[in-house]
Image (spheres, grey):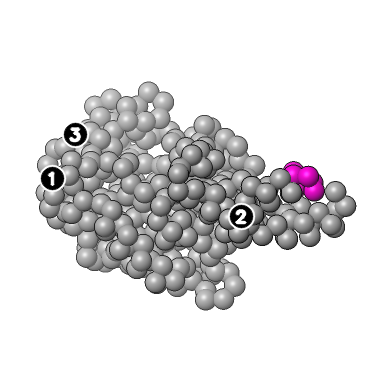
Amino acid sequence: MTGSVQPESKDRLIEPTAALVDGGPLTESQIASWRHQGFALVDGLFPRELIRNLLEVAQARFPEVDSDEAQLRNDFGDGMTFPDESDEFNDLSLHLRLLEASAQLLEVSVHDLRLTQSDLWPKYGRPSGDRGRFDNQDQRIHVDYPNHTLTHPASWSQPEAVEVIIYLCDQTDVGGATAIVPRKGPLDEAYMPPMVNTPGVGDVPWINDRLQAEEWFVQHRPDVAAFRATLYEREVYTQYKTGSALLYRHDVWHRGTPLASGALRLAHNLTFKKADASWISTLHPGWAWAMYQPDQRMERLIAGLRPEQRSVLGFPFPGDPYWDMEKLRAVEARYGPLGFDASPYRKALSWTGR
């Protein structure tokens, strides 16, 4: 049976490296790690106060570790989803340094990014035992693209999206390191397309639990089982801290490992894609649907954002062909009472003469 190296193996631990304080915010080595190995673990992207405040909000939102409700949670869902009633969650989702880091990795401008995922959910540590094939305590190794894109990731040199996990606790306190397989180079057999040897792709059933997934491959696809065994042997583990961000790709092998029994891990997951990658879907209901909320959370958020942040939601950037003076006046009438500043859009129109 396929085994896995435990995070206590010191030579397999990946420590976070510090983001730049000014400019950037990613260093050249962090960018190179993401582009060549497929990931970078970064500290210092966000203000500590924002992380601390969001942690307090999330702890109050989710069940206590020892509650019956917590024991019933077995997978993703029932978390915080953008846009949320929490200002802290929304602020982190569209934090400019996070957008700038994603733009660095994809080599585009911030206004050429689009947000397709932002959710925060709890994972509870439980004693070992069989909880079914969908249990997420000890995940099978996988790639994320199948539930993000309608197609298949482009070639390695043409990445289309950045995935992010922002950890709201320390790995040394709760366990649950993210295991990831670094790409060794263009001839790495683990990363030769098509990347289909994973549960839930083709005719392989969707199984989340590691032991049950690998047993299926041993019984039905022994050649694939042997390939997947090599992936577990190559795993490294994120020694994340509170506020660390794991930046990775849709086509990187990775998985979640077990938490300490009785522990709670809170993590914020995000995805940013290139604006023209229409085949990469938004995981949540459309942002405009969020305007069907009595508290007008989305309208107020739109009104208060900077133009770069609005554009990540699909709001046309100043200078976009969408704009003419009639449209600008109409949009200003909609959002002006909530504080919308139309001057950047009006200035761009004055340059184009529309």
Q: Is residue 72 visible?
A: yes
Please name the residue that numbered disc 2 is placed on: 337
The single residue placed furthest to the right in the displayed view is 353
* Amino acid type for the residue under numbered disc 3: Gly
- Percent from the top left, x then y, of residue 253? 39, 46
Q: Is residue 276 left or right of residue 182?
A: right
| 121, 259: nearer the viewer | 121
Please name the residue that numbered disc 1 is placed on: 68
The residue located at (21%, 51%) in the rendering is 63
Mark 2 element type: helix
- Kindly check if marks 2 and 3 are in contact, taking CB atoms under 8 A apart as contact: no
Count every numbered label the image shows and give the total.
Answer: 3
Q: Is residue 230 left or right of residue 124?
A: right
- Percent from the top left, x then y, of residue 175? 23, 59
- In 3D space, how far apart are the residues under numbered discs 1 and 2 (Cα atoms)? 45 Å
- In 3D space, how far apart are the residues under numbered discs 3 and 1 (Cα atoms)? 18 Å
Closer to the N terminus: mark 3 or mark 1? 1
> On the image, which quarter does residue 107 sit in?
bottom right
**Can you say whether 205 is above or below 162 in the image?**
above
Magenta segment range?
320-327
Mark 1 element type: helix
- In 3D space, how far apart are the residues under numbered discs 2 and 3 (Cα atoms)? 52 Å
Closer to the N terminus: mark 1 or mark 2? 1
The residue located at (39%, 72%) in the rendering is 49
Assess disc 1: are there few (<14), some (14-19) or many (≥20) residues with their C-alpha within 10 Å of its C-alpha.
few
- Percent from the top left, x then y, of residue 27? 54, 70
Please name the residue that numbered disc 3 is placed on: 132
- Kindly check if marks 3 and 1 are in contact, taking CB atoms under 8 A apart as contact: no
